[in-house]
Structures are given as C-alpha cells and as structure tokens.
Image: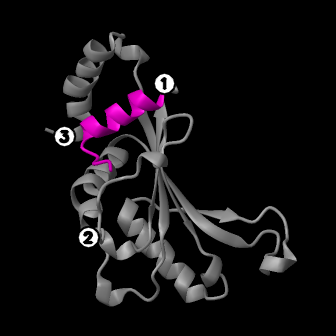
C-alpha cells in the first residue's frame, strides 16, 4: 500500500476517532520544500551545475534558483546573484520523496536516533537538515565533487497544533527521539 493511500484510509480515520474530530479538521501534508544554500560554491560555476544536477536527481524535479534581493558587502554578495536552489514537491512526487526519505535516507544517516521533536515550528511543520547529499541512493558517491547539505520542510495544512502534527508524522513512520 502506498503512503498516500495509507494516510487516507488508515491514519486519518484513526486520528479522527482518537482526537474526536472530523477528518476535515485534521492536518494534511500539502507540500515538501527542499532548499540548498550555495554560499561557499558561488564562485565555482561547475560546482553550482553539479549541485543543480544532483538536486534534480534527488527530487525528480528541476530546482528553481533563489536570488539575492540586495547586496551585502561583508558576505561578498551582490544583488541578483544566485544564492541557492529550491524545489517544491506536491502530490505524487511529494509522496514518493517522503517514502524514500522515511524508509531509505533517514536510516542511512550516521548515528541516527530519530528526528528531534524540536524540529516542529509553531504551525506544526516539520523541518529537517541533511548534511550530505550522498545519503540519497540516487547519488553515486564516486561522482560527487563537493559535499553540500539541504533543508527539508514538510508543510501541513489544517490546524496549527503541534501534538496533532507529531502524531500524524509518527503514524506515517517517522521516528522521533
């Protein structure tokens, strides 16, 4: 059974009965946002292209460039310069990415005890940080030129209650400390 089917047929009805609410008033996953900052690699064009190519392999979708809005001389940053990449995943690609993240990627992390419960924001969204891209099975470690990390945010629609969000992600298979 796919994760999206499991959420709709098992997890949401279970949450509705346990929290005594209708299913429409429960949190639902709306999107996954993957961001990569390219601060140390801004001067190297080949590294930027490699990061874009690897992020495309990981997410299955071409990333969009994030551009500096203003110049900051202390950081050697100019207005209009590329400072990162961002990918927003929705529907089928989102569910596929979460399945891979949950079953393959997180267990491959070194010394993984579980996701910290401090990773939730006030809206109940879950934010994770990954230090190396080589933990994804699509990336071949031999071909990697530079190691770079990424931020992964799983955004929810619905009520802004952290306890509901924790329960929702725990039922989806995420392991918490």
Which x, y percent locates residue 49?
52, 80
- What secondary structure is marked by label 3? loop
> Label 1, label 3: how many angstroms apart (C-alpha)?
22 Å
> Label 3, label 2: how many angstroms apart (C-alpha)?
20 Å
| Residue appearing at x 25%, y 35% in the figure | 171
**Rendered image: mark on residue 118:** none
Few, some or many residues within 10 Å of mark 1 (<14, 14–19, 20+): some
* Location of mark 3 (residue): 2
Whichever of callouts 3 and 2 sits on the residue coming sooner in the sequence is 3
Which x, y percent locates residue 39?
64, 77
Q: Is residue 35 left or right of residue 53?
A: right
Visible residue check, residue 95: yes
| Residue appearing at x 55%, y 34% in the figure | 123
Which x, y percent locates residue 98?
32, 49
- What secondary structure is marked by label 1? loop
Whichever of callouts 1 and 2 sits on the residue coming sooner in the sequence is 2
Whichever of callouts 1 and 3 sits on the residue coming sooner in the sequence is 3
The answer to if 173 sits in the magenta stretch is yes
Q: Is residue 121 left or right of residue 43?
A: left
- What secondary structure is marked by label 2? loop
**Rendered image: mark on residue 158:** 1
Q: Which residues are magenta?
A: 161-177
| Residue appearing at x 48%, y 65% in the figure | 150
Few, some or many residues within 10 Å of mark 2 (<14, 14–19, 20+): some
Few, some or many residues within 10 Å of mark 3 (<14, 14–19, 20+): few
Q: Is residue 90 left or right of residue 43?
A: left
**Rendered image: mark on residue 137:** 2
């Amino acid at each position: 059974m796919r994760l999206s089917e499991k959420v709709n047929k098992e997890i949401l009805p279970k949450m509705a009965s346990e929290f005594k609410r209708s299913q429409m008033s429960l949190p639902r996953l709306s999107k996954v946002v993957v961001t990569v900052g390219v601060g140390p690699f801004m001067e190297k064009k080949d590294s930027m292209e490699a990061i874009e190519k690897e992020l495309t392999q990981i997410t299955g979708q071409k990333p969009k460039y994030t551009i500096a809005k203003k110049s900051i001389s202390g950081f050697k940053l100019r207005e209009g310069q590329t400072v990162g990449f961002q990918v927003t995943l929705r529907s089928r690609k989102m569910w596929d990415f979460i399945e891979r993240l949950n079953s393959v990627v997180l267990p491959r992390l070194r010394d993984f005890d579980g996701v910290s419960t401090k990773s939730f924001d006030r809206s109940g969204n879950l934010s994770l940080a990954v230090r190396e891209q080589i933990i994804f099975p699509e990336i071949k470690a031999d071909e990697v030129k530079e190691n770079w990390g990424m931020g992964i945010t799983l955004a929810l629609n619905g009520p802004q209650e952290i306890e509901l969000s924790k329960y929702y992600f725990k039922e989806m298979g995420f392991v918490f400390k």
